[in-house]
Image: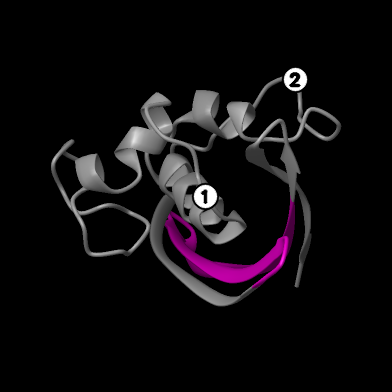
Amino acid sequence: MSFASACPCGSGRPYPQCCGPLHTGATLAETPARLMRSRYSAFARRDADYLLRTWHPRTRPTELDLDDDTEWTELEIHDATGDEVEFTARYRTPRGDGAMTERSRFARRGGRWFYVDGDVR
């Protein structure tokens, strides 16, 4: 995936004008939905550092091992209300295509949004 290609989050904007500045720390996500999109892009780009930085300290794992065999192909946000976002993420693996739907919870701390946890459906 080239740096200037379309952002994996599905916004239709180039990555450097979309999730790129969040991944580098140049800007912060203003809403839980924006953080969700940027985290999806980080999964697609295998950016474990960003995922850990945006995970709430109370629930953050000590390390994150991203599967090189998973290609994240599409993000669909169903609902973004308050501090929760419900989405479906589609992916492709050598074993076939799949999807996961999750209702994620976010919390604001020190002026920044963090992913707390989620319920996979």
Q: Residue at x 83, y 35 (%)?
A: 59
The amino acid type of the residue labelled 2 equals Thr
Q: Residue at x 43, y 34 (%)?
A: 46
Q: Position of residue 86 (x, y in %)?
A: 65, 71
The answer to whether one can see residue 70 in this image is: no
Looking at the picture, does residue 8 appear above or below residue 60?
A: below
| Residue receiving disc 1 | 30
Q: Residue at x 86, y 31 (%)?
A: 58
Looking at the picture, does residue 81 appear above or below residue 35?
A: below
Q: Position of residue 118 (x, y in %)?
A: 77, 57
Magenta part of the chain: 81-106
The answer to whether one can see residue 76 in this image is: yes
**N-term mark: 2 or 1:** 1
Tell whether position 47 is magenta: no
State left or right for residue 71 relative to residue 118.
left
Disc number placed over residue 93 in the picture, else none: none
Please state which of residues 89 and 33 is positioned toward the viewer in this rendering: 33
Quick one: SS at disc 2?
Answer: loop
Label 2 or label 1, whichever lies nearer to me, is 1
Q: How would you rate the neighbour count of disc 2 (Cα within 10 Å): few for under 14, some for 14-19, many for 20 or more?
A: few
State left or right for residue 40 relative to residue 113.
left
The amino acid type of the residue labelled 1 equals Glu
Q: Position of residue 66 (x, y in %)?
A: 54, 34
Quarter of the rendering occupied by the C terminus: bottom right
Please state which of residues 41 and 32 is positioned toward the viewer in this rendering: 32
Tell whether position 85 is magenta: yes
Please state which of residues 119 and 18 is positioned toward the viewer in this rendering: 18
Q: Quadrant of residue 93?
A: bottom left
Residue lying farthest front?
Answer: 111
Q: Residue at x 52, y 49 (%)?
A: 30
Q: CA distance from mark 2 to mark 1?
A: 26 Å
| Residue receiving disc 2 | 62
